[in-house]
């Protein structure tokens, strides 16, 4: 089995291990079906982000888009994290909690990978 990420490997292992007592072939089928379902959801999410114009080649391009969307001279607390980077997401959420006034947070694609981008504004 080929995994695209650690999260995918964990999903496969979790589903496979929950099927204890079932024949091996059935456990493998259940785990493979769970991975396929996850991949389908990811493709759908990426498709919709692309349609909404929220797909970028670089973080800098995503930030430039965000600044244009927010269109406020008082922007601070700029934050960015790839969704699959647990440590970066924890830092993102911490920066988000520290913000005040208006806020902007959304999911984007950067180089084909889901990411969160945000800021505070309107001080």
Image (tube, grey):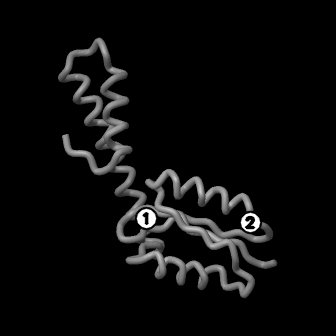
On screen, residue 89 above or below 36: below
Specify few, some or many for label 1: CA neighbours under 10 Å numbering under 14, 14-19, or 20 or more: few
Q: Which residue is at 31% across, 40% downward?
A: 9
On screen, residue 23 above or below 109: above
Q: Which residue is at 23% across, 30% downward?
A: 29
Q: Secondary structure at mark 1?
A: helix
Q: Which quadrant: the N terminus?
A: top left
44 relative to 123 in the view: left or right? left
Q: For the residues carrying marks 1 and 2, which lies nearer the camera in this image?
A: 2
Q: Which residue is at 66% across, 69% downward?
A: 104
| Residue under pointer 1 | 48
Q: Separation of disc 1 and disc 2 at Cα?
A: 28 Å
In percent of width and height, residue 75 lies at 70, 80
Q: Residue furthest top?
A: 21
In percent of width and height, residue 19 lies at 32, 20
For this rendering, which residue is in front, 29 or 73? 73
In percent of width and height, residue 84 lies at 44, 54
28 relative to 41 in the view: left or right? left
Is label 1 in contact with label 2 (beta carbons under 8 Å)?
Answer: no
| Labels 1 and 2: the sequence-earlier one | 1
On screen, residue 120 above or below 81: below
| Quarter of the view holding residue 7 | top left
| Quarter of the view holding residue 10 | top left
Q: Secondary structure at mark 2?
A: loop
For this rendering, which residue is in front, 119 or 91? 91
| Residue under pointer 2 | 99
């Amino acid at each position: 089995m080929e995994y695209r990420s650690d999260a995918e490997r964990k999903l496969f292992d979790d589903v496979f291990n929950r099927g204890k007592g079932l024949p091996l072939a059935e456990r493998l089928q259940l785990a493979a079906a769970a991975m396929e379902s996850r991949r389908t959801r990811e493709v759908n999410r990426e498709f919709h982000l692309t349609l909404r114009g929220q797909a970028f080649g670089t973080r800098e391009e995503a930030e430039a888009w965000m600044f244009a969307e927010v269109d406020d001279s008082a922007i601070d607390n700029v934050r960015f994290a790839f969704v699959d980077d647990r440590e970066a997401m924890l830092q993102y959420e911490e920066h988000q909690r520290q913000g005040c006034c208006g806020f902007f947070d959304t999911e984007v694609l950067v180089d084909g990978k889901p990411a969160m981008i945000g800021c505070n504004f309107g001080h």
